[in-house]
Image (spheres, grey):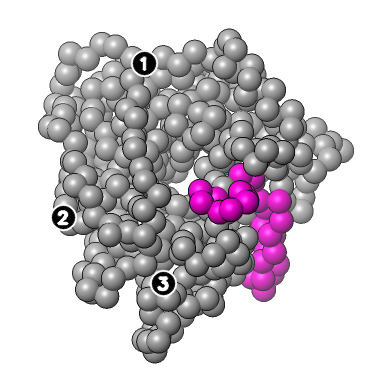
Amino acid sequence: MKKILLATACLFLGAGIANAQAPVPDNLEKLSNFQSTGTTEFTFIEQTGEYADGIRKNLERIKMPDGFKIELYAVVPDARHMAVGPQGIVTFVGTRKDKVWSVTDRNKDRVADEVKDFAPSLKFAIPNGPCFSSDGFLYIAEQNRVLVYPAAEFFYESPDVAAFNVVKQGELIPPEEESYNHTARVCKIGPDGKLYISLGQPFNVTPPEKLDLYKKHGIGGMIRMNTDGTGREVYTYGIRNSVGHDFHPVTGELWFTDNQVDGMGDDIPPGEINRQTAQGQHFGFPWYGGGDVRTNEYKDEEVPVDVVMPAVETVAHAADLGMHFYTGNMFPAHYKNAIFSAQHGSWNRTTPVGARVMVTHIDDEGNATTEPFAEGWIDENGEYLGRPVDVAELRDGSILVSDDLAGAIYRISYEGN
């Protein structure tokens, strides 16, 4: 079922472009016409046994503020970004491989009863980024296309699901720019009803000859479009690789994480949580590698743009990924409208850092401070027991945390006074 993906340490130095393969022709045309594909089989993931028990054992190490509890919600291989259905029936989970998973808690005991692949008659290519509209349309941003599933919470019970192009294969970015690196897309529907999609650029530091092309297409930035794919425009510039964004519940402003440049040492440059207040703002890359640290490649050049500096600088190389503004009522009041975000953990730092869930509080003037909320996935030997990727919220106000190393989703709830 699983494909083994090989990577080398030189990928971050980024000669960059690989021969990424588009999905082979699949059943999209049939599904768009509500026709059966003849597919009958699902892949189901076992939720009990020694593997699940081992994950639960590791969770005993996790430290959180008093009153909070973390439990295994589901075993989900390669779990990345999550989208909780508006009806609360299914949580859809993307991967950086070729599966999207549907996770169902049928008896509402806050533990998943069933995990199976979604739309198994389709061929996915890095379907990392699922997101929902408020009226129940599921969007999935893949490496180089975006599909919409108008009734995913209903059709997921069948191998055949109604599915339609939002952005056709090969039209999200130029096919010749497809890469194995920084290609995990994230999507969210904004307060304006438009679809926002991050497009990481594939290099460690973008070479000058690519800048104009990437600016045109929004690579190394964020694009937005109408939910039918029309009206595409670049919304954000100067991002290296953002793998998490959300909109402030009160102001509607876009906030996003960004991963900083590698190869400059263990302690620089810092990671970023950014606040965007207007379309077209530029966040500094590739002239800045993170915060106000200039990249070696562009350090002698005058910065040709007005740069918005991070709202929060985070520890270098912790790999801040998915983030979510908390709007529930379960947690204490001071968590309302705070950002919960996942630090995936450093991949080549001498001493590993990250692998934890952070919380960022924002005051009325937009000033932000961040601190650890749940940590303990790095053991005393410096080994990873898990690598958090994304944060989502259930209807009861508890939060879910995905982990692509353990292949799991955790649920964090509050039981204090």
Residue 253 falls within the magenta-colored stretch: no
Query: Helix or strand or loop: what does disc 3 sit on?
Result: loop
Q: In the image, which residues are magenta?
A: 346-372
Say whether disc 1 or disc 2 marks the residue closer to the N-terminus: 1
Left or right of 334? Residue 71 is: left
> In the image, which disc is placed on residue 18?
none
Q: Amino acid at mark 2?
A: Glu
Q: Mark 3 Cα within 10 Å, few/some/many (few <14, many 20+)?
A: many
Q: Amino acid at mark 3?
A: Phe
Q: Nearer the viewer, mark 1 or mark 2?
A: 2
Q: Is residue 246 visible?
A: no
> In this figure, which residue is indicated by the disc labeled 2?
176
Residue beneath the point at 17% across and 13% down: 38
Q: Mark 1 Cα within 10 Å, few/some/many (few <14, many 20+)?
A: few
Residue 159 in which image quadrant: top left
Residue 352 falls within the magenta-colored stretch: yes
> In the image, which disc is placed on residue 43?
1
Q: Nearer the viewer, mark 3 or mark 1?
A: 3
Residue beneath the point at 54% across and 72% down: 291
* Residue 118 on image: x %, y %: 35, 25
> In this figure, which residue is indicated by the disc labeled 3?
285
Say whether disc 3 or disc 2 marks the residue closer to the N-terminus: 2
Marks 1 and 2, how far apart at CA: 33 Å
Residue beneath the point at 39% across and 73% down: 286
**191 relative to 147, above or below:** below
Left or right of 177? Residue 71 is: right
